[in-house]
Amino acid sequence: MEAGSALDAAPLRGFKDFYQYASTTRVIAGRDLLDSAGFEFKKEGARRVFLVTDEVIRGTGLVERVEAGVTDGGLEVAGVFDQVPQDSSTAVVERCAAAAKEAGADSFLAVGGGSVMDTAKVADAVFTHGGGAAEQEGFFLMPRDDDGMGKPFDIAPLACIPTTAGTGSEVSMAAVIKDPERKVKLEIADFPLFPRLAILDPESTRTLPAKIAAATGMDAMTHAIEGYVSTDWSPHQDARSLHALRMIRGNLERAVERGEQDEEARGNMLIAANLAITIALGSVHAMSHPAGAQFGVPHGVANAIHLPHVIEHNAGGGSDIADRYRDIADVFDVSEPEVGPALAAYLTELIARLGLPTRLSEVGVPEEGIPALVEGAMGDGTTLLNPREMGEDEYAELYRRAM
Amino acid sequence: MAYFKDADEVYATIGKLFEDLAEDDELAPKFQKANTIVQYQYREPQSQITVKLIEGEDGQVDFGDTPMEPEVVMSMDADTAHRFWLGKVNVTVALARGQMKAKGPVAKILKLVPLVKPVFPRYRQLLEDSGRRDLLEAS
């Protein structure tokens, strides 16, 4: 093997050869913002707004409040698509895009969790540029001028009102959609997918069930931790990750336990999820994507199950990796010398306190599923960003431990 | 200035590497686990290499036009491809900067990336053996 190749583990400190950072979404956060959804979205060029949501959210009455907020701001509601399932698919995206076209919409407003927001993003791309949902797959492949090497073309204005505090999709350029035919999760990322506007109002998470608040909160926790230790780390993301972890430490359990009664904790968790999101992830996500695609394990639950095992494995990969985890452990006042096992144990206890499963066998994943899961993890782009090099044997062992 | 003056130079170096790998008893079966057909579309100079990686089937490498239908298409400057095989390109950075573009079920290719490290010294050796030491100085 050649020494010093670009495929060797990247250093986790010092001045990097390269990184890029972008965060182009205008974020407004605070109380009573749902009523001004139209007033704010108008500033982004929206006129005829197509709402994307799911039946559960619609049943809470939240969508009607947002619709009223849209029309109060002088905009029209062109239509509502409320058929987004928990793990959205290419077919749902295409139905959503076609419905928006049929309604004569010129913009999208997503009201929901990660599945709803990702559906709206990819539907917007299909709506604007045509083609099928699966054709959007890839990183930085959206249409551009200068023979595909120049500025990417805008898609229709998109605003997001997250109803969970975890995914961070409302401020990210990424979307994940299930392709049921290939049994994979399509990963799509490019600058135009940054929503123009994100509205963070704790009213939108007031009726969130405790289990979902816990799972989505662990998703945010995973983004913050993986973003901090990824080989694609950056000082910009470091600052966001560490502050997100401080906010999660102070608010996650409160938001889960006290839910409707604790507006402050819910609001702070919305902001923490916003800060935590990054596409520079690692093996937790590489393991969770196939668990979701093949066995329907909810993303936040899968992350919660895999996170402690990946931490313990990665932290044993060298002092520079362990040092990064030590910074994270400091946030939680975990100070044992062996940072990997200590941080993993701390998180396992937290996950149990939140009422989440800690084993794959508890969520319907059979031992015989491991080879297919390993194949999925090896093909996931985030594997290349994990701080410790991963192979099939390592993934098989981690899945076994997570059983 | 581009490292290669025409498509034939690309085929004689990078193309030859693919042909060698397709016949390698140890590495070929590992790459064939991808079960796909990959097409590398290079710019400057314009050239195209299509590689069949199907488990249990003989390898096939076509230069230029091909009857094979690729499932994954990777496009980049030939210089970027050359630097990649020298071990000097970080794939994730190249994808992020748009220096490499991958279309199709990219997962099938990404899982091969960790396998290519042993290929780097082979490429250097191939360049030396074919009298192209000039290309080793690429940075």
Image: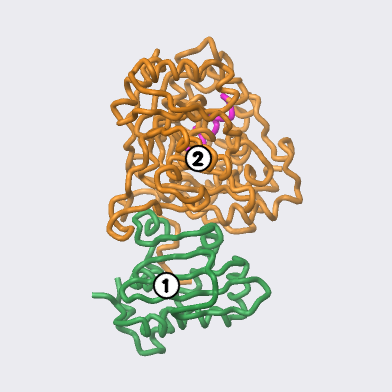
Chain colours: A orange, B green
Is there any visible trace of residue A335 in the rendered image? no
Image coordinates for residue A71, horizontal then vertical, percent: 38, 18
* The C terminus of chain B - image quarter: bottom left
Q: Label 2 is found on which chain of the structure?
A: A
Of the pair A361 and A88, the residue shown nearer to us: A88
Residue at numbered disc 2: A98
Marks 1 and 2, Cα distance to the nearest angstrom?
44 Å
Q: Is residue A366 above or below residue A57?
A: below
Horizontal side, residue A41 vs residue A250: left or right: left
* The N terminus of chain B - image quarter: bottom left
Q: Are marks 1 and 2 on the same chain?
A: no
Image coordinates for residue A345, horizontal then vertical, percent: 61, 34
Three-letter code, disc 2: Ala
Which residue is drawn at the image coordinates 33% and 58% (left, top)? A148
Image coordinates for residue A305, horizontal then vertical, percent: 63, 37
Three-letter code, disc 1: Trp
Horizontal side, residue A360 vs residue B45: left or right: right
Is there any visible trace of residue A142 in the rendered image? yes
Which residue is drawn at the image coordinates 46% and 76% (left, top)? B49
Label 2 sits on a secondary structure element that is helix
Image coordinates for residue A131, horizontal then vertical, percent: 47, 51
Quarter of the rendering containing residue A403: top right
Extreme left residue here? B1
Which residue is drawn at the image coordinates 36% and 42% (left, top)? A155
Q: Residues within 10 Å of mark 1 (few under 14, many from 20)?
A: many
Q: Residues within 10 Å of mark 2 (few under 14, many from 20)?
A: some
Residue span colored magenta: A213-224
Q: Label 1 is found on which chain of the structure?
A: B
Q: Marks 2 and 1: in contact by CB < 8 Å?
A: no
Residue at numbered disc 1: B85
